[in-house]
Image: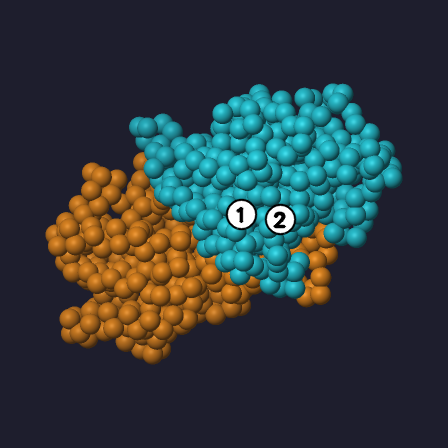
Chain colours: A orange, B cyan
Amino acid sequence: MPGAKLGLIEEQARTEAQAPTSALAMFGPETPLRLDSGVSLAPFQIAYQTYGTLNADKTNAILVCHALTGDQHAASANPVTGKPGWWSMMVGPGRPIDTDRFFVICSNVLGGCMGTTGPATTDPNTGEVYGLELPVITIGDMVRAQAMLVDHLGVDVLLAVVGGSMGGMQVLQWAASYPERVLSAVPIATGPRHSAQNIAFHEVGRQAIMADPDWCGGKYIAQGTSPRKGLAVARMAAHITYLSEEALHNKFGRELQDRSALTFGFDADFQIESYLRYQGMTFVDRFDANSYLYMTRAMDYFDLAAQHGGTLANAFRNTKTRFCVVSFTSDWLFPTSENRTIVHALNAAAANVSFVEIETDRGHDAFLLDMPEMFATVRGFLNASARRRGL
Amino acid sequence: MPGAKLGLIEEQARTEAQAPTSALAMFGPETPLRLDSGVSLAPFQIAYQTYGTLNADKTNAILVCHALTGDQHAASANPVTGKPGWWSMMVGPGRPIDTDRFFVICSNVLGGCMGTTGPATTDPNTGEVYGLELPVITIGDMVRAQAMLVDHLGVDVLLAVVGGSMGGMQVLQWAASYPERVLSAVPIATGPRHSAQNIAFHEVGRQAIMADPDWCGGKYIAQGTSPRKGLAVARMAAHITYLSEEALHNKFGRELQDRSALTFGFDADFQIESYLRYQGMTFVDRFDANSYLYMTRAMDYFDLAAQHGGTLANAFRNTKTRFCVVSFTSDWLFPTSENRTIVHALNAAAANVSFVEIETDRGHDAFLLDMPEMFATVRGFLNASARRRGL
């Protein structure tokens, strides 16, 4: 299914504000994306990065899926922040996902804000920024769009799909929706559905954004404003859930900013306070508030069992995909028990699955950090997958 | 130390907006309260409730300390909400804290918003609402003010001091500051200091309030506004921490409001969302936003070991107080480990201490709920304390 068949318009040119260094795959009115909401989206575009070289047989492609606030810059400097790619320790020459051997694709998800069509995109049909007029996007929609991109890149079967957190949800959705196109799947620090507690934290974030008068009912771009304070509060609340109590205690404890004394005021006395404020402030410079609403909603809506008659194992019935599930002991957002639910379902579906729980105090964020055991696990698993494919 | 010595002006009269049914103890310029910040507060007032009758020997008085958003209405209908007192299952005739036998005192803490001097109070020295001009209040300040109230009520030695969460912090502070005045102490679901993670959650709440333009730099009462949205978001974030993942899962799971289908929008689809929104909305009708800032700050600042040279056991050196520490298995705000730290310190101080960890899925909020094992524990402990005192 090469791209030409799908009526694509490829545009490698820079776009100014969004994803200046990313390739864009353009999908025109003749290739609408049927969304889970029932609405058809057309046209739309996907911003993506590739790393490494696709081999002649097109058998060495690995799709990397990003998390809630991630983007396509897994292994390349982020053009907005100037920082290294969010998974540059995982993806690159000689890295566990070795770009000397593999062709790695990473795209900004549908609904994102780094070049792929999202709420900050101008709707070509109206000439106005989508805002909340963009239909709600699901993990299934993201994956369906990614499949169109993979088609466009001339890849039929992916050697692997890899991702953590919301990226892990996409991995599971890929394995369920396109089992014949995914040889290996590596869902990390994720779950088969979003829990009530996780929905609750997301709802707090959304309410913080929507409570900000500068949100303007979602039309802040047209109004020339930005709900920075609300988005920062949302990020602060979420950020706590990405860490562990133990890590926060070890890193900050009750250490004061000014080590000498409490100030008896409401400025940041404790280091944890100024750390959190910094996390909130820097986030708003790189993320669109409406996109945050869409991303959190997509995660909340994710429920793979519900897609398959209420039985998770049915999502993987007769699958030939090999799975490697990874969890972290101190992750309380997607605790090991959630990851184990996936393993149990895969076992019930007679799938080929390995499961690694990694001991760490770094919490959910561990999947983004220097985790030698995770790297060794992913490297070994992908090497075995490559050997099976004769690479 | 009877009240007259302290130059008190007692006023049982109703005040309009605040605590219409509560007694008020007024402390004039001649009895300033020296705060931990170094500032002297005068005049100030304490709104309180009593239940039961003080015996002739004045040996049957129990002080109940309330939590972050609690008030003096432990066992009487709340005049703002019309709901039963927040601990009416614990305190009352025949209840574990039996008002047929004991004289129970419960006062609104300093910095509160139910009649005791707080940021919403008009500063008699300036004629303007305090707002952020009120000095930052500590748990130590709250307890010092309570001691003045207890003096005023003619009680020298308390049979017991009992409270959960921030109330438990006050219990510990009482035992540390006034060991000779506390025969028995029951700290429930609390800790000897506020953890980094707990400070982080409080900071999110404060930022949510201060991000609301209607907060007006703390001067919203003078401006005729109220940061309702910000305070609601703060409450929502905090409320999640009061529950457990298990309880949320059992109570709400992924149940939808409209059971038939997802709406593909940003209204409350899931029951947990509308539950949280309701918690936020109802809270703002009964709580002052600045008071929320002061209460959270007081908890953040609490560090009993730091008050005693860094060694928690020093806080209880040579204590004769009997302690009963209670924790709940699913409480992740003040987990059993935090409560056990108190027990270890008490053991190191050779104190008389019993410790009960109660199995429940109700999370931190368990101390406010129908917990037969907690009731039996408190009842038994207080009965033994009463026997020792010849009651």
Whether B121 is drawn above or below A388: the answer is above
Q: Which residue shows up at 61% across the image and 33% down it?
A: B60
Looking at numbered disc 1 in the image, what kind of residue is underneath it?
Phe
- Give the chain of mark 1: B
SS for tag 1?
Answer: strand
Q: Which of B373 and B318 is in front in this view?
A: B318
Is residue B187 among what the camera can see? no
Query: Which amino acid lies under the numbered mark 2 shown in the image of this protein?
Result: Ala
Callout 2 secondary element: helix
Q: Quadrant of the C terminus of chain A?
A: bottom left
Give the quarter of the image for residue B110: top right
CB contact under 8 Å: marks 2 and 1? yes
Residue B240: % across, % down: 47, 42
Q: Where is residue A62 in the image (x, y as percent from the top left)?
A: 28, 65
Residue neighbourhood size for the residue with mark 1, other residues' Cα within 10 Å, grouped as few (<14), some (14–19), many (≥20): many
Image coordinates for residue B340, horizontal then vertical, percent = 47, 54
The residue tagged 2 is B175
Q: Please name the residue shown 20% across and 72% down the image.
A: A384
Residue at image position (58%, 38%) is B389
> Which residue is depicted at the point 35% across and 32% down?
B256
Which residue is at the front of the view, A359 or B195? Answer: B195
Res A337 visible: yes
Badge 2: chain ID:
B
How far, Cα to Cα, is label 2 from label 1?
9 Å
Locate the N terminus of chain A and report the quarter of the image it occupies.
bottom left
Residue A245: % across, % down = 48, 57
In the image, A371: left or right of A236?
A: left
Q: In this view, does A330 lie to the left or right of B37?
A: left
Residue denoted by label 1: B323
